């Protein structure tokens, strides 16, 4: 039972089985963020983000044994985590949300150092999630720069 719940969480309700699963995972995240931000608050989104981050760091390793690949494309919870980082500072601004989506996808795909280090050299949960956290931080930096000049 717990294994099935973990599978659905880490594949974000099987979105990870779609082509371009990382992009769809990031898109799901911005929709999820927008709904939580507008119907509840940014604080609720932060709590959800932190729960998923720590839960994934500790429990992702248990689902990985079911896959042949060390970083299976079906596992897209890392996209949720990475995409959430710049969203935490978008304050519901649709333009900033779109910019965070585009920039996060760019940095996630290009894997600029140290993201490539996490992607290639570190195994397990930290390796899978680490490169997306770096991409999220790079995207966050751009969001903060834009906010400084608005």
Image (cartoon, grey):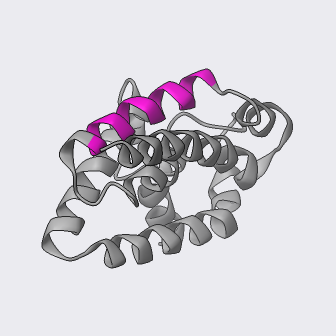
Q: Residue at x 49, y 51 (%)?
A: 77
* Residue range of the region highlighted in magenta in the rendering: 96-110
| Residue 31 sits inside the magenta stretch | no
Question: Residue 74 versus residue 123: which sits nearer the camera?
Answer: 123
* Residue 84 in which image quadrant: bottom left
Task: Determine whether, in the image, residue 34 is placed left or right of residue 128.
Answer: left
How far across and how far down the image is residue 53, in percent?
56, 65
Number of marks present in the image shown: 0
Q: Residue at x 28, y 58 (%)?
A: 33
How far across and how far down the image is residue 112, in percent?
68, 27
Q: Residue at x 35, y 31 (%)?
A: 18
Q: Is residue 94 above or below residue 45?
A: above
| Residue 100 sits inside the magenta stretch | yes
Question: Residue 131 versus residue 70: which sits nearer the camera?
Answer: 131
* Residue 58 in which image quadrant: bottom right
Q: Is residue 38 above or below residue 126?
A: below
Residue extending farthest left: 39
Residue extending farthest front: 149
Q: Is residue 107 above or below residue 95?
A: above
Q: Residue at x 35, y 78 (%)?
A: 43
How far across and how far down the image is residue 93, in percent?
22, 51
Task: Determine whether, in the image, residue 102 is placed left or right of residue 139.
Answer: left
Question: Residue 91 versus residue 27: which sits nearer the camera?
Answer: 91
Quick check: can you spot residue 66? Answer: no
Quick check: can you spot residue 64? Answer: yes
């Amino acid at each position: 039972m717990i294994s099935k719940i973990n599978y659905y969480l880490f594949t974000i309700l099987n979105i990870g089985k779609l082509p371009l699963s990382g992009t769809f995972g990031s898109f799901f995240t911005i929709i999820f963020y927008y709904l939580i931000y507008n119907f509840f608050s940014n604080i609720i989104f932060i709590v959800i983000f932190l729960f998923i981050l720590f839960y994934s760091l500790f429990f992702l390793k248990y689902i990985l044994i079911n896959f042949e690949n060390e970083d299976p494309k079906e596992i897209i919870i890392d996209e949720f985590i990475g995409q959430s980082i710049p969203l935490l500072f978008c304050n519901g601004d649709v333009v900033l949300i779109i910019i965070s989506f585009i920039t996060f996808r760019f940095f996630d795909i290009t894997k600029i150092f140290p993201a490539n280090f996490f992607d290639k050299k570190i195994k397990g949960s930290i390796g899978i999630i680490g490169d997306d956290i770096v991409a999220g931080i790079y995207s966050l930096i751009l969001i903060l720069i834009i906010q400084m000049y608005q």
